[in-house]
Image (cartoon, grey):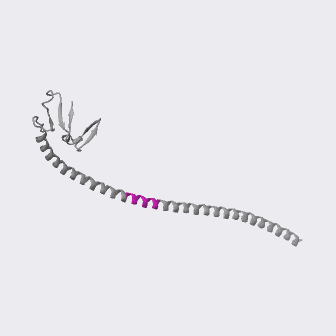
Amino acid sequence: MVDGGEEEENDQNVRYWKTKYELLYADYGRTKDRSEDLETRLLEVVEENERREGEKQERIQELETEIGEANRRIEQLEAACFRYKNHGKLTKTEAECEIAQNVETNSDESTPCPTDGITRSPDFHAGQHLICEYHKLPVLAKGEGFIYGFRWNETNKIHIV
């Protein structure tokens, strides 16, 4: 009888360990699946991060290129501005010489004002009308023009009422 009791005891012991093994194996399977899922997620996050870093680097390179082009354009504009300013100074002095000659030839009876170049015409009532040679007005110093239906060129005068 000892052998039968031992056999039952061993059988219970085997079932106990077999059940425990099956539970542990099922737990191991769940843990393994969860670990694989987490590893896959982590790899996806790493790949996404690397992709974003690559996009950022590309964008940085594009912006650096645009900044370089903008700086070159700024330099070109500054050079053009400098040339324009210097050209304007030369043109202004040349225009002043021409103005002095035109005032002497065009205003036989009238006297020009030294500050603004406006001459009073003796043909009109004193103080009511002014005649100004167009090139003496800075806005109109273009050689010819058209404003509000009035057209002029170098030989014309503009009457201001």
Q: Residue at x 36, y 56 (%)?
A: 70
* Quarter of the view holding residue 66: bottom left
Q: Is residue 69 above or below residue 100?
A: below
**For the C terminus, which image quadrant?**
top left
- Residue 109, horizontal then vertical, whole percent: 9, 34
Residue 1 occupies which quadrant of the picture?
A: bottom right
- Residue 59: x, y in percent? 45, 59
Is residue 104 one of those drawn in magenta? no
Q: Residue at x 21, y 32 (%)?
A: 160
Residue 15: x and y, percent? 80, 66
**Residue furthest right in the image:** 1
**In this rendering, would 37 be left or right of 128?**
right
Q: Residue at x 56, y 60 (%)?
A: 45
Residue 5's quadrant in the figure? Answer: bottom right
In screen coordinates, is 125 left or right of 73?
Answer: left
Taking depth in this image into account, of 20 and 68 the one nearest to the observer is 68
Magenta stretch: includes residue 59: yes
- Residue 71 place in picture, x, y as percent: 33, 57
Residue 78 placement, left or right of 114: right
Overall secondary structure of the magenta section: helix
In the image, the segment drawn in magenta is 56-67
- State how many labels appear: 0
Looking at the image, which residue sits at the far bottom? 3
Between 42 and 91, the one nearer to me in the picture = 91
Judging depth in this view, the residue of 159 and 42 nearest the camera is 159
